[in-house]
Image (cartoon, rainbow, N blue to C red):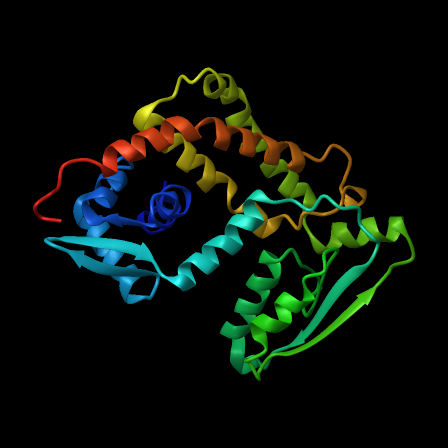
Amino acid sequence: MLKPRSLVFDLFGDYLRYRGGETRLRGLVSLMECFDVPSATTRVVVNRLRNEGWLESRRDGRETIYALTGAAWELFDEGRSRIFDRVRSPWDGQWHMVIYTVPETERTLRGQLRKKLSWWGFGPLSPAVWLSPHDRLEQVKNEFIKEPAVQLDVFRSRSAGLESDRDIASRAWDLKELDSDYVDLLEVYQPRLADYRAGRLTGRAALVERTQLIHDYRLFPFRDPDLPSDLLPDGWHGRLAHEIFLEAHGLLRTAADAYVDELIASPTDPAA
């Protein structure tokens, strides 16, 4: 089930950003109703997001216009890059390692650090030793440079060879479970490609399907470190899943965009 809070971000990120980056409340209400979210719930959610600093608003006559704040766009753009982009350059065989120390009294901060490391494609070789085949050490240091409780030591190193590298990857990430989840995703969406290609989904159906697709796929980058092909197990389904996601996302775009345009251009709701 799609959560209203996540839906607001999805609608801004995949549709409203290309329509001036803002919307009247009545338009957002209409969009959310496509997902069976009542108007009252939408109003509560946008007020909370505004209070939390993710949305900003202004008045235009009797209507309220909402837009994501700069901080929200920055977070969204980082997430979009992780979802849509893949590293294509050959791996140089070098691991990028982070060793951290966080006091026991700062468990919340430690959890935030681990979550960020996972998002950037690092995996735990041991509880406090995380590594990645991609050079994102500067991102880690810049994110926590103002946290004196976090001590970070970063290294670059090589293993004894490819066999060791593959063993390291298998210990730092649960690739078997991840691959199984990719198979489940493919079983849902790969058979639907024929309908997408034929343009059989239109209007609300296209919008809902495309948004559900994004919802189902977007958590994978939190778990998938985008490993070089040399480190992936045989028969890996992650690359195919990414290709299917991109194709389906693109095929549904025109119909979903047209329906969004229709909804946000609807007559003014006097209560907006």
Q: Nearer the viewer, residue 146 or 123?
A: 146
At x 35%, y 50%, the residue is 21
Query: Is 249 above or below relative to 56?
Result: above
Q: Nearer the viewer, residue 180 or 202?
A: 202
At x 59%, y 82%, the residue is 103
Taking the view exactly as shown, the residue that stands out farthest to the bottom is 148
The image position of residue 214, as x and y in percent, is 46, 39
The image position of residue 202, as x and y in percent, is 35, 22
At x 55%, y 34%, the residue is 246
- Which quadrant would the N terminus be assigned to in this image? top left
Q: In this view, does 156 lie to the left or right of 3?
A: right
Query: Is 99 above or below relative to 68?
Result: below
Q: How many marks?
A: 0
At x 49%, y 53%, the residue is 77
Q: Which of 127 and 131 is in front in this view?
A: 131
Residue 120 occupies quadrant: bottom right
Query: Is 94 above or below relative to 177?
Result: below
Residue 143 occupies quadrant: bottom right
Taking the view exactly as shown, the residue that stands out farthest to the left is 270
The image position of residue 111, as x and y in percent, is 54, 68
The image position of residue 256, as x and y in percent, is 37, 30
Q: Is residue 267 left or right of residue 91?
A: left
